[in-house]
Amino acid sequence: MQFCDDCGSMMKKEDGVMVCTSCGTSAEQDADESFVSTTEQSGDELIETEEGADFEGKPTDDSVHCDECDHGVAWYTIKQTGSADEPPTRFFKCKECGYRWREYN
């Protein structure tokens, strides 16, 4: 990523040169610019759902207990329901009876 020397805004590539998105200054692309890749996700971190799937998230270990049937394993998902500076909410669905509940951290 290259930034404008005049105003500090991010530049984008247009017709072989870098152009500032704010002030329009153009410059040659930095030669030492390199790309950094992050590590790949493992399959354990990915959740793929489709219509009619028999699960709703990732399974928990036996650390939760359903208030309806006292079963110890549930599906869970995590969603950001408040502002970004608040912790996310965990939504659970009991694998035994289907009862749903949520926990706030």
Image (cartoon, rainbow, N blue to C red):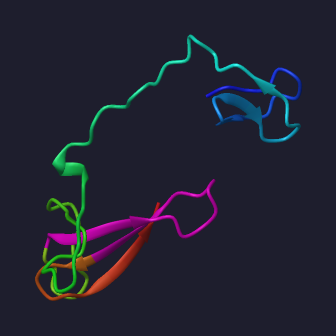
Of residues 100 and 26, the one drawn nearer to the viewer in this rendering: 26
Residue 65 screen position, x and y as percent: 21, 72
Quarter of the image where one finds residue 93: bottom left
Of residues 15 and 103, the one drawn nearer to the viewer in this rendering: 15
> What residue lies at 30% left-to-right and 74% top-to-bottom?
92
Quarter of the image where one finds residue 33: top right
> What residue lies at 18% left-to-right and 50% top-to-bottom?
44
36 lies left or right of 60: right
Residue 76 screen position, x and y as percent: 28, 69
Residue range (magenta): 72-92
Is residue 82 magenta-colored?
yes
> What residue lies at 89% left-to-right and 37% top-to-bottom?
23
Residue 39 screen position, x and y as percent: 31, 32
Is residue 103 magenta-colored?
no
14 lies left or right of 35: right
Of residues 51 and 76, the one drawn nearer to the viewer in this rendering: 51
Residue 40 sits above or below residue 99 on the image = above
Residue 8 sits above or below residue 61 on the image = above
